[in-house]
Image (cartoon, rainbow, N blue to C red):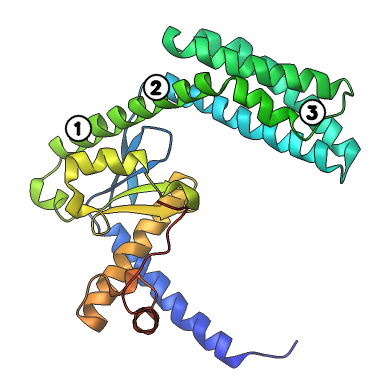
Amino acid sequence: MQSDPFGEINTTFRTLYGANREELFASTPLAAITLIGTGEIWRIEHGEVVQSYPPAPWLRQVKSLMHAVIGAQATWARLVRGKDPESARQAAVVLNKALEEAVSRLALELPAALAAPAQIVLGKLLQLAVNWSAGQMASPAEFPEALRQVRVELENVIAIVGEEAYASIVKGLRALIDESDPAVWEESLFAVCGVAFGRRDNVEIAAAMSVMGEDCVGTRLLYLENAHDVAQGMACIAAALTDRALGVDVFGDPYRMWRDILGDVAARHVGKGFFPPLGPD
C-alpha cells in the first residue's frame, strides 16, 4: 500500500488534539448529559460520572412500546419487500415472541392510565406478528391500516410519556443546579444526546430551556447528534469544550469551531448563516 505522508501528518496533529481534549475534560469541574427518552440526567465532574438524577422507574420500561412499533414496522416492510423471505419470516417469529413478553410485562409495570392504551397498541401489533409468524402473507396496506386503528391510543401514550420526560428533566436539572456552585454551573454545559432526527422539537431541550433559559440554547444547552449512550455523550462534550477553547484561542470566538470551519464560504454563497432544518415547518 502506498504511503500517505499527509495522512500521517494529519494523524499526528489529531493525536495532539486528542491528548489536550482528554486533559481538558478531566479538568472540567461540572457538566451534565441526558439521553433522549430516558428522563435521566448524569452529573459529570472532572470527566467522570458521579451522580444520576433518575426519572420515574416506568419511563425506562415504556420505551419498549415505541421500540415495538419500530420492530413491527421493520418486519412488515421486509415481508412486503420480499428480498429475503425466509429471513423476514424468522424475524416475524422473533417479533411475535418479543411482543408476547412485552404485553405480559408492561401491564404489570406501567401506571394504569398508561397501561390501558399501551396494551391496545401492543395487542394490535401482536395480532399482526402472530399471523406473519404463522406464514400469512403481509400486504402493503396491512401495517399502516392497523396503526391507523390504534393511533389515538398510541398518541395518548406518547403524550403521557412526553409529559413525564419533561417533568423529570426539569426536576433533575433543578436538583443538579441546587447542588452546584452557582459560579461553576454558569460555565457548565448540559447536553441532550440522541439520534440526528430527534433534534427537532426535542422535549429534553424544551424542559431544559424552562430551567436554563432559551438564550442558553446553542451555547450551554446542546443537542449532541448520534451520541447514543453516556460514554459517547461524554466524548462529545469533551470535544465541544476543546473546540470552544480552540475557537477562542485561534479566532477570538468561542463558537467559531462549533460550525463548519468553511462556514464563512457557505454563508457568503447563501447570503446568510443557516442551519439545515429537518422537515417542513
Looking at numbered disc 2 in the image, what kind of residue is underneath it? Ile
Would you name the residue on which mark 1 appears? 175
**Which residue is pictured at 40% across the width and 51% down the height?**
281
Q: Is residue 266 among what the camera can see?
A: yes
Marks 2 and 1, the one that precedes in the sequence: 2
> Quick one: 4 or 146, which is closer to the camera?
146
Nearest to N terminus: mark 2 or mark 3: 3
Going by the image, does 132 lie left or right of 168?
A: right
266 lies left or right of 30: right
Give the image location of residue 110, x and y in percent. Answer: 47, 13
Crowd rating for badge 2 (residues with CA inside 10 Å; few <14, some 14–19, many 20+): few
Pair 2/3: label in front: 2
- Counting from the top left corner in percent of width and height, residue 85 is at 89, 38
- What amino acid is at disc 1? Ala
Rendered-image quadrant of the N terminus: bottom right
Q: CA distance from mark 2 to mark 3?
A: 29 Å
Foreground mark, 2 or 1?
2
Question: Which mark, by number, is residue 160?
Answer: 2
**Local secondary structure at mark 2:** helix
Q: Earlier in the sequence, mark 3 or mark 1?
A: 3
Q: Which residue is mark 3?
A: 92
**Label 3, label 1: how many angstroms apart (C-alpha)?**
44 Å
Q: Is residue 215 above or below residue 261?
A: above
Is any atom of residue 188 visible in this view? no
Mark 3 crowd level (few <14, some 14–19, many ≥20, 10 Å Cα): many
Q: Secondary structure at mark 3?
A: helix
Q: Amino acid at mark 3?
A: Ala
Front position among marks 3 and 1: 3
Mark 2–mark 1 distance (CA, rounded to whole Å)? 23 Å
- Residue at 34 percent of width and 84 percent of height: 268
